[in-house]
């Protein structure tokens, strides 16, 4: 596990709150130069601390019609590759590393049951996936 200093933690907190914040605004809020922010972001990306930038949708935005959680068992030696393959699938909105019976949980969102079936099939074929269990989401309460 990587140890992050206070400045990296502050940078990550600001990016979590707003991944589109400009480097200039990041530098102002952190009290450092633009070059410092750019160098730290580049290092965090290179060291795979920052894996990407994303968009979070409001609860009032129409979501995909078919949503599910897929619990996944993976070979230990292939787990990183399985995670990368899952994250590369646009219908997988999140991947969670877990404890217990399952190694990973993938959140799946798509428009039709036909495409859902295809996605489930393709995930089961990922090299290193040994077992899956999928649960369709019927309702969500927030």
Image (cartoon, helix red, strand yellow):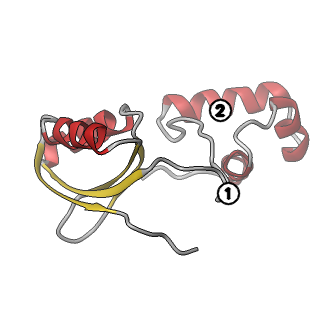
Percent position of residue 122, x then y:
19, 35
Percent position of residue 88, x then y:
37, 31
Residue at point 48%, 34% (across, down): 47
Left or right, 9 with respect to 24, comes to left
Q: How far apart, in angstroms, are the residues tagged by discs 2 and 1? A: 32 Å
Nearer-the-camera pick, 4 or 75: 75
> To which quarter of the image does residue 134 belong?
bottom left
Q: For the C terminus, which image quadrant?
A: bottom right
Figure disc tally: 2
Mark 1 crowd level (few <14, some 14–19, many ≥20, 10 Å Cα): few
- Identify the secondary structure beneath mark 1: loop
Percent position of residue 36, x then y:
77, 30
User: In this figure, which residue is indicated by the disc labeled 1?
Assistant: 60
Residue at point 74%, 36% (across, down): 20
Image vertical order of residue 51 relative to residue 64, above or below:
above
Residues at marks 2 and 1 touching, judged by CB atoms closer than 8 Å = no
- Identify the secondary structure beneath mark 2: helix
User: In this figure, which residue is indicated by the disc labeled 2?
Assistant: 41
Percent position of residue 89, x then y:
36, 33
Left or right, 2 with respect to 6, comes to left
Mark 2 crowd level (few <14, some 14–19, many ≥20, 10 Å Cα): some
Nearer to us of marks 2 and 1 is: 1
Q: Which sits earlier in the primary sequence, circle 2 or circle 1? A: 2
Image vertical order of residue 74 relative to residue 128, above or below:
below
């Amino acid at each position: 596990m990587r140890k992050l200093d206070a400045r990296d933690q502050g940078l990550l907190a600001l990016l979590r709150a707003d991944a589109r914040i400009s480097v200039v605004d990041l530098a102002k809020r952190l009290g450092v130069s633009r070059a410092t922010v750019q160098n730290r972001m580049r290092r965090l990306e290179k060291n795979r601390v920052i894996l990407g930038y994303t968009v979070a949708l409001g609860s009032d935005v129409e979501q995909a019609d078919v949503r599910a959680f897929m619990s996944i068992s993976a070979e230990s030696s292939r787990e990183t590759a399985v995670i990368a393959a899952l994250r590369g699938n646009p219908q997988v909105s999140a991947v969670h590393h877990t404890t217990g019976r399952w190694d990973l949980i993938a959140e799946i969102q798509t428009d039709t049951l036909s495409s859902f079936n295809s996605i489930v099939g393709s995930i089961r074929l990922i090299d290193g996936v040994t077992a899956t269990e999928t649960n369709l989401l019927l309702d969500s309460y927030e």
